[in-house]
Each structure stands twice: as structure tokens, then as C-alpha cells.
Image (cartoon, rainbow, N blue to C red):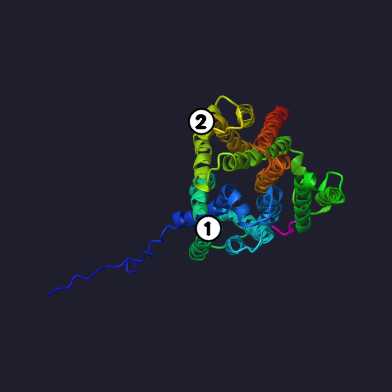
Amino acid sequence: MTQTRRTTSEELGDAPPVRDRSNLILLVLCSAAFMALLDVFVVNVAFTAIGASYSGSDLSDLSWVLNGYTIVYAALLIPAGRLADRHGRKAGFITGVALFSLASLACAFAPSLWWLVAFRVLQAAGAAALTPTSLGLLLTTLPAERRAGAVKIWATSTALAGAIGPVLGGFLVTVSWEWIFLINVPLGAAAIVGTVLLVPETKDSSITRIPDVVGAIAIAIGFGGLSLALVKGDEWGWTSRSTLLAFAVTVVAFVVVAIRMAKHSAPIIDPALLRVRSFFWSNVTAVLFCTAFGAILPSIILRMQTSLHYDALITGLAVAPGPLLVPFVAALGQRLSRRMSPSALVALGNAFVGLGAVLMAVTATTEVNYWTQIFPGWMLVGVGVGFALPNLLAKATVDLPPARVSVGSGIVNTSRQVGYVLGVTMLVAILGTLTASAADSLDSFRWGWWAIAATGLLATLTSFGIAAQARADR
């Protein structure tokens, strides 16, 4: 009986097919970036619940749960990314995810509010490492033909965090606010295992200069001092020794930043880039736009939870329509870009954000109605974000030399985080305490929304400066 012999690919001289792991790599890297941004939105929704857990904490103290994270993230984003580019993006990514996950676990068991703030700072350091390295690994490990699509998916994943973050955060807070941090632990562990098994190491051997860590620390101290002075000024007294000392520390820190920019071989912000007018005005607009958005999101959350007495889950559901509107408006903006310049679309978006704040201010009454006083203005803000943010990010680095685009992108993201810090600080300084009468609380919210509207208007004006480079070239 003749036995049929099966011929193998090795006998034919062919190597076994190599499995394409691009989709798995994309999933791992996007999930970590999603996790880092998700944390920002879920903490907003959990703000009131966190405050209730720590007796004696007021709004100015609670603001550091947001600002402590954002300040450190903004300060370390560029140096962490550059160090990872030099020494290994995979190692930097794993380190960032591990630190973020362990700090999340510590946040859940923080014995006091200030321990929670300290652990949030560690979270921010992890996020500053994993965010740029996740994008860097995408661009260096995936095939060239897949990179453009992968970057869009990466950007979409971070936008998705903004859409589902409030709802997921609200659901978790109904169990316990600690779960908004605990959920990061299994997600982080899965990302680390996936990275170890799937993602190759990459680095840029051409990078020889160490980023200016002293300048990064000075930035953190400067914005920390400014935030402290503004949120505590009313309580301490605007001419008190403590307030004046905080302002003095701010001034000294920013002087140090300016000196380091001028003298360091690898400054956090390269002065030469700021001489590119479209890049300069993009960063100015990014700071103003994110100041407005960084203030209006917590303002409506606080309004719903203190005046309507919404729990965290209902608050999350009430916030969700705004972020869900963003991708549809962004798609519309893509079509309008054939007829309108990017700077005009950015200006239109900022105008919508300002108009949303105006609508909230003029319709607000002591008796709060979500559908008539909050929902319409919040939808206008969603339209504004959809028009402004994608075009702002796309235009910011378009006039930079190709070799400086990565650094420029890091600076723009840092400007965004600075805006969020200023927005939260501005709101807290205006609202002060929410334990006053309903009428006083209403006046505080109105003043906050008028300040946001003014910031949106200013951002509308600076948006037109983004086109300055093209006009100069012509």
C-alpha cells in the first residue's frame, strides 16, 4: 500500500509565513493611550464623590486632584518623550504604563486628599512617558502603508475616551470612586504583557542631547505656584504673605524657564520654533481654547451635581452628548475645509465654545433645568470642539521643518495641558466655595461662564494669526 507523503513548506525551500501582528500592536498601544486620557474624564465626574470622602476638603483643595496631574503631565511630556526616543521607546512605554498602573492602585487607597494628589502626580509622570512613546512605537514598528491609518485610529481612541469617559466614570463611582483608579490596574497589566510579547524595541540613535529636565521642573513649579496663588488668594487674602510668596515663586520659576530656553542645548521649548508665526499662534490659541474647555467641563458637572443633585452616573450620561457630537462635526469640518481655511475653522470652533458659555450664562436661573439651561450650550461647545481641535492640531506643525515636527507636536500638546490647568484654576478662583446661598452660587457660575466666553472670544481672534505664515510667504 502506497503511503501519500505530505510536502512541507520547508522542503520546498520556503520560509514559514510570518504572522502579521500589526493589528495586535495597534490594539495594545492604543489601549494604553486610551487609558491615560480616560482617567482625566472619569476624575471630573468623580470630583464631588472624592470631596465627600475627605472631610474638610474644599473646592480649592480638590482642584489639585486635577491640576496636580495636568501640571506634571505638561511639564514632563516633552522630556519623557525625548528620553524614550534616545534610550528605547518600548522600555519607556512599559515604564510609563507600569508607573501609571501602580500609581492608580495607590490612588484608590490614598489615606488623605493630599496623598491622593501625590499619587496623581506619579500617575501624570507615567502618562507623560506612555503617551508619546505609544505614538512613536506606532510610527516605527508598523509598515509604512499602515502608519497614516494607525495614527488616525490612535487619535480616535483618545477622542473615544472623552466620549465614554464620563459615562464609565459615573457607572464606576456608583460602586465606589476608588474604582475609577482600580480599573487601570488590569488594563495596564494587559498592555505591559502585550508590549513585551508583540512590540519590538526602537530608538533614535541620532538623539545625543539630554532634554532640559531643570526647565521641565521649573515649568511645573511655575504653574503650580500660579495655580496655588489663584485658587487660595480669596481664602488667604490677595495681599497676604502666602499669596505674594506663591506669586513670587511663579515669577522666579518662569524667569528660570526663559533663561534655560535661551542657554540650554536642548530646551523644553525651542525659541526658534516660536519664531514660526503659524506655530506661535497655534500654541497661543491652544492655550486659550483649552482654558475655555478646561473650565466649562467641570463647571457644568459641578452645576449639575450641586444644584440638580445628579449622582455621578446621571452626570456622566448628561455630559456624554457633547463629546459624542465631536467626531460628526469633525467630519463636517473636513468637508468644509475645501472652502474654508483651517484658521477660519479654528476660529469658528472657538466662537461656538464662547457662544455656548454665553447661552449658559444668560439662561441660568436659581431653578435649574438641564434641557433648557445646560444642554443647548453644551451642544454648542461640542460643535466648537469638533471644528477647532482637529484643525488646530493639523495646522500647528504644518509650517515646521520635517525634522522638527515631532518636537513641535510635543510643544502643542504641552500648551493644551497648560490651558487645562489655567481653565480649572480660573473656574475655582471664580466659584470659590459652593456652600453659599443658591443666589450667590448662581452669580458665581454666571461669572465663570462669562469669563469662559471672553476666553473663547480671545481664542477666536488669535485663531486668525495661525494663517500668518502663509500670508507672509505669499
Task: Check disc 2 and give the amino acid type.
Answer: Leu
Asked if residue 396 lies left or right of residue 137, the reply is right
Q: Where is 49 relative to 96, above or below?
A: above
The reply to whether residue 417 is in sight is: yes
Near-viewer residue (134 or 8): 134
Q: Position of residue 397 (x, y in %)?
A: 66, 40
Magenta: main secondary structure: loop
Highlighted magenta segment, given as a residue range: 206-211
Taking the spot 54% from the left edge, 47% from the top edge, the residue there is 158
The quadrant in which the N terminus is found is: bottom left
Task: Look at the image and say whether residue 358 sits in the magenta stretch.
Answer: no
Q: Nearer the viewer, mark 2 or mark 1?
A: 1
> In front here: 41 or 430?
430
Q: As drawn, which residue projects farthest toward the front? A: 437
What percent of the width, then of the height, locates residue 403?
Answer: 67, 47
Tell me if I can see residue 206 in this picture. no
Q: Secondary structure at mark 1?
A: helix
Determine contact: label 2, label 1, CB under 8 Å: no
**On the image, numbered disc 2 is attached to which residue?**
332
379 relative to 38, above or below? above
**Element under disc 2:** helix
Image point (52%, 66%), residue name = 196
Residue 179 is marked as 1
Q: Residues within 10 Å of mark 1 (few under 14, many from 20)?
A: some
Q: Nearer the viewer, residue 273 or 244?
A: 244
Count of all numbered marks drawn on residues in the image:
2
User: What quarter of the picture does the C terminus occupy?
Assistant: top right
Q: Which mark is on residue 421?
A: none
Three-letter code for the amino acid on which mark 1 is drawn = Trp
Quadrant for residue 72, please give it: bottom right
In the picture provided, is 19 more to the left or to the right than 359? left
- Spot occupied by residue 337 in the image (x, y as percentages of width and height): 56, 29
